[in-house]
Image: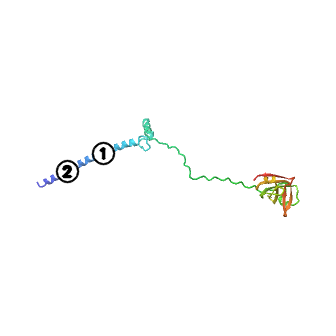
Amino acid sequence: MSQTPKIENVLTEVLEVKAALVNITELLNEQRDCLTAFGKALQDCVEVLQPPGHPLRKDITPQQQTPAQHQSAVQSAPAVSVQPLTAKPASPFKPVPVQPKPSEPAPVPAVKPGMHRIGDLKEGDKKVNVTAKVVTVNAERTVSSGDRVTEATLSDDTGTIQLSLWNDHIDLVQEDSIVSVEKGYVTSFRDQPVLNVGKWGTLKVEAPP
């Protein structure tokens, strides 16, 4: 008789545990239903945001699409806008003009066969033929007769000499040009030889500066 209350207590506890298990089972079922509904809603969102054929869809590849699915994916793909090319803004910096490279002056010519060497000319030489470079040209002056006169320095690979220029010959000669004197003659001024074209000689420009 003394053990009857204990048995009743145990049965009561068993019933309480059973009721608790039932409640837990019901809660789990409700959570399962919620998860199922959530998964369906998530799948619906994926269908809307990433239709079949979308690059991020892994379940259906383009090769597995039906023609209708492919057409639907093409129509639902977002339009890509192409921005037109705009003109490049003008630079605030002004371009620096490129200066042309100055031409190098003509070299001093070598003495050609049949021509006289400037280094060998002396007072009294006649029928002198010389081809040389004009190194300098002095400022012209007008003498009492009204003629224009000046001097130019000629140079070849043997030396230099003063060339006496009168009137029109002055306009032919420029620095760094190559000139030829034919049938000239040599005089002296202050112990320095001077080449003269003279009446019977000629002066030609072989190469301009």
Horizontal side, residue 96 vs residue 7: left or right: right
Apparent side of residue 25 relative to residue 129 in the rendered image (left or right):
left
Residue 8: x %, y % from top left: 15, 52
Callout 1: helix, strand or loop? Answer: helix
The picture quadrant where one finds residue 107 is bottom right
Which residue in the rendered view is the most extreme toward the bottom?
191
Q: To which quarter of the image does residue 114 belong?
A: bottom right
Q: Position of residue 180 (x, y in %)?
A: 82, 53
At x 30%, y 45%, the residue is: 34
Residue 91 on image: x %, y %: 56, 51
Instruction: Report how far apart the C-alphas of labels 2 and 1 lie in the structure.
Output: 27 Å
Sort mark 2 into few (<14), some (14-19) or many (20+) by Cα contacts within 10 Å: few
Which numbered disc, 2 or 1, marks the residue that appears first in the sequence? 2
**In-front residue for pair 160/192:** 192
Q: Is residue 77 left or right of residue 117?
A: left
Q: Position of residue 78 (x, y in %)?
A: 44, 41
Name the residue furthest left.
1
Q: Which residue is mark 1?
A: 34
Task: Tell me the number on the disc at residue 88.
Answer: none
Which corner quadrant of the image does residue 57 belong to? top left
Mark 2: amino acid: Glu
* Residue located farthest toward the top when viewing the structure as drawn: 68
Disc 1: CA contacts within 10 A as few (<14), some (14-19) or many (>=20): few
**Which amino acid lies under the numbered mark 1 shown in the image of this protein?**
Cys
Q: In front: 180, or 30?
A: 180
Residue that mark 2 sits on: 16
Give the foreground label among 2 and 1. Answer: 1
Q: Is residue 162 left or right of residue 26?
A: right
Q: Element at badge 2? A: helix
